[in-house]
Amino acid sequence: MKKYDVKWLDTAKEDLKNVARYVYQYSPSLAKKLTQEIRKNADGLKERPRKYPEFERIPILRKMVVQKAVVLYFIHEDIGRVEIYHIACGGQDVDKVLGK
């Protein structure tokens, strides 16, 4: 089975920090648990990048849901890499997160 590299784009790293800060206001322990779960699931993309469905609004992206967070990523088949693109949380407007 082919293994992929998982790369976090700067936008996704910043989104993860923002999600953690937001959740931390309500529950520090939940913020830690959520970020750990997002990282763990993202790490799992190394072996199963197609585990999650295509993002209906932008089919070249895939959508991984972790609790109330939506992680958008792209699979680069040609170079064997998965890029974590953006993360939205709860009621956030995904289009706004994507800059649309």
Image (tube, rainbow, N blue to C red):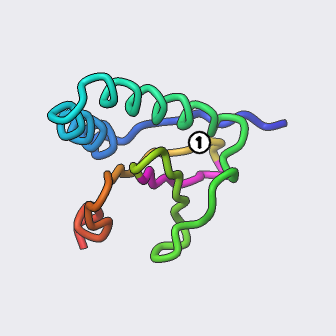
Image quarter in which the N terminus is found:
top right
Tell me if mark 1 has few (under 14), some (14-19) or many (20+) residues whose alpha carbon lies within 10 angstroms of its own. Answer: some
Asked if residue 29 lies left or right of residue 62, the reply is left
The residue depicted at 40 percent of the width and 26 percent of the height is: 33
Image quarter in which the C terminus is found:
bottom left
The residue depicted at 31 percent of the width and 51 percent of the height is: 89
Asked if residue 68 is among those painted magenta in the image, a careful observer would answer no
At mark 1, the secondary structure is strand
Amino acid type at image mark 1: Arg
Considering every residue shown, the one lying at the far left of the view is 25
Residue 66 position within the rendered picture, expressed as x and y whole percent measured from the top left? 48, 45
Above or below 19: residue 72: below
Above or below 99: residue 23: above
The residue depicted at 63 percent of the width and 44 percent of the height is: 79
Question: What is the quadrant of residue 25 in the picture?
Answer: top left
- Magenta stretch, main secondary structure, is strand
Asked if residue 71 is among those painted magenta in the image, a careful observer would answer yes
- What residue sits right under mark 1 in the picture? 81
Highlighted magenta segment, given as a residue range: 70-78
